[in-house]
Image (cartoon, rainbow, N blue to C red):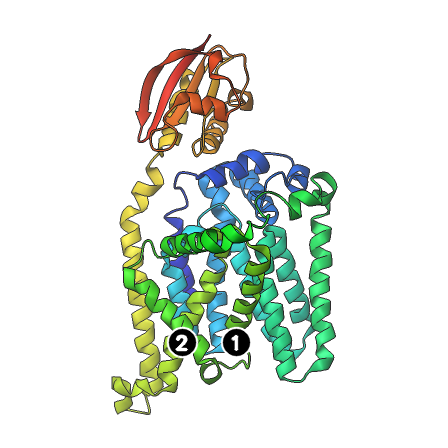
Amino acid sequence: MPILITFFGLFLRLAALNDPVTYDEAYTYVAFVSRSWWGVLSDYSLPNNHIFHTLLVKISVSLLGNQPWSLRLPALLAGTASLPLIYLLGKRIYSSTTGLVAAMLAAVCPVLIRYDSAARGYSLVALFTLLAWLAAADWLETSRRRAWLGLAVAVTLGMFTIPTMLLPAGGIFLWALLTLAAQKAWRRIPALLGAGLLSVALTLTLYSPVLRVSGWRKLFANNFVLPVEPGLYFSRVLWERLTQTWEIWTMQTPPALGWILLAGVILSLALHRQIARQQISLLAALLAWLLCYVILRRPDAYDRFWAFLLPLGLLWAAAGYVETAQRLGAEQWFPWRICPQTGPRLQRNFLAALTLSVLVYTSASSLLTFPQRWNKLGNVEYLAGELARDLRPGDLVLAGYPNDAPLWYYLSRLGVPEATWRARETFSRAYVLVTTSFEPDPAKVMRANHLDPALFAFPGEFLGESGQVQVYLFSPR
């Protein structure tokens, strides 16, 4: 059954693999993937460069060609690989039943599918979080060196993808420390600290090109990671970001389902000692660590900042209901109680049939949209194709956020030189793309590209539009 869940989860993620590229995905390619290998390793001008993920994307594009699906393939594989790991964690900590339910929930979760099919590093961080927890649990139980090393390596690769791996890693190390203290295994604490120090040393080694070329401020003190002013943060920013995260995570699900799953998470925390095989709750340790981090760092955290929590949250939600039902004897209401000899087999068959039904239904719904999604051109992609046919030497193409990076990406795929969209004061003609819902004034797009509108002969010629994106043609003044 875990293999079947993984297969269906992969299928559901394939449907979104050729969707129009988003701003961050396109910028990742144009600013980093398209550069040299050394550039990927050393350029941290913006934290958009999730370095380990960018390296994997560069390998994928080099082998398979520059396509939206090849950009997203590393994230897709990481997200798909997380499904059997969720099952293994659920089986190890709770029961195989919880593992199956949690893996099934992760396979069909809309927002998780979205993260797993986007060319960003968030699915890799989630994968390395699951691997680190498995390795830590194994080491605590067996003291095996390979588990100890696996913990350090998983944390290192997560940090090399996005430094926010510090959030789950800190929770896992705190949980392991509390577990050793509860077991009075004081002699093993230095080994745990050694795993943490090893991960720090390996992370700094991997980031040494960044520290050498971009400098430590780009990594540790860039504008995107600086703490928000305390008064503003605790009065408005934190609540706004958490509200946005909840809205995005529950956007494509029935309104009540998110609250039901959250109730399951709370139930698993409240009844941890009764339903889990581990003495200390990782959820409690992680919440304590995140609370300290939020108070001290005050991050301006969007939904993707917390993406690593989704697989864990689904596991805890499944445990809250499944394990509580089993411990409280709720199975007595099911038909297999009539025949105790075959009860366990009937229970497994019922669960397998229910899981398979959910997967088949969601996959069939996705299958109906599959051809349309793979063949549909986005607005910017369509306009890039139209522009590429008309562009002449000396032409300039300008766009503002959020169309600029996707436009650069699609123009580069069509062989248009990079100089065409690099802002300059001398040009023969200038195509300007505006978004009616965001930046409808061509002059604002020009200023956003650090060009004086006085360089352009107004009014420009309106050429057409696709969706909310309009195209104007200007001559130099």
Left or right relative to 362: residue 425: right
Can you say whether 13 is above or below 408 in the image?
below
Q: Nearer the viewer, residue 226 or 393?
A: 226
Can you say whether 370 is above or below 196 in the image?
above
Query: How far across and how far down the image is residue 403, in percent?
Result: 43, 32
Query: How far across and how far down the image is residue 323, in percent?
Result: 40, 80
Question: Given contact means CB atoms under 8 Å apart, are the residues at marks 1 and 2 in contact?
Answer: no
Q: Considering the numbered disc 2 on the image, is that residue within a helix, a strand or a loop?
A: helix
Would residue 116 be seen by someone viewing this image from the given angle? no
Query: How far across and how far down the image is residue 463, in percent?
Result: 33, 17
Q: Quadrant of the N terminus?
A: bottom left
Residue of label 2: 267
- Most extreme residue toward the top is 477
Q: Nearer the viewer, residue 79 or 140?
A: 140
Would residue 340 be seen by someone viewing this image from the given angle? yes
Q: Residues within 10 Å of mark 1 (few under 14, many from 20)?
A: many
Q: Quadrant of residue 461?
A: top left
Can you say whether 69 is above or below 123 in the image?
above
Query: How far across and how far down the image is residue 126, in percent?
Result: 52, 59
- Separation of disc 1 and disc 2 at Cα? 12 Å
Type of the residue with mark 2: Leu
Q: Tell me the residue at 37%/22% (across/down).
A: 386
Q: Residues within 10 Å of mark 2 (few under 14, many from 20)?
A: some
Q: Tell me the residue at 41%/69% (across/down).
A: 102
Q: Quadrant of residue 45?
A: top right
Residue of label 1: 281
Sequence-wise first label, 1 or 2 = 2
Can you say whether 200 is above or below 447 in the image?
below
Q: Which mark is residue 389?
A: none
Q: Considering the numbered disc 1 on the image, is that residue within a helix, a strand or a loop?
A: loop
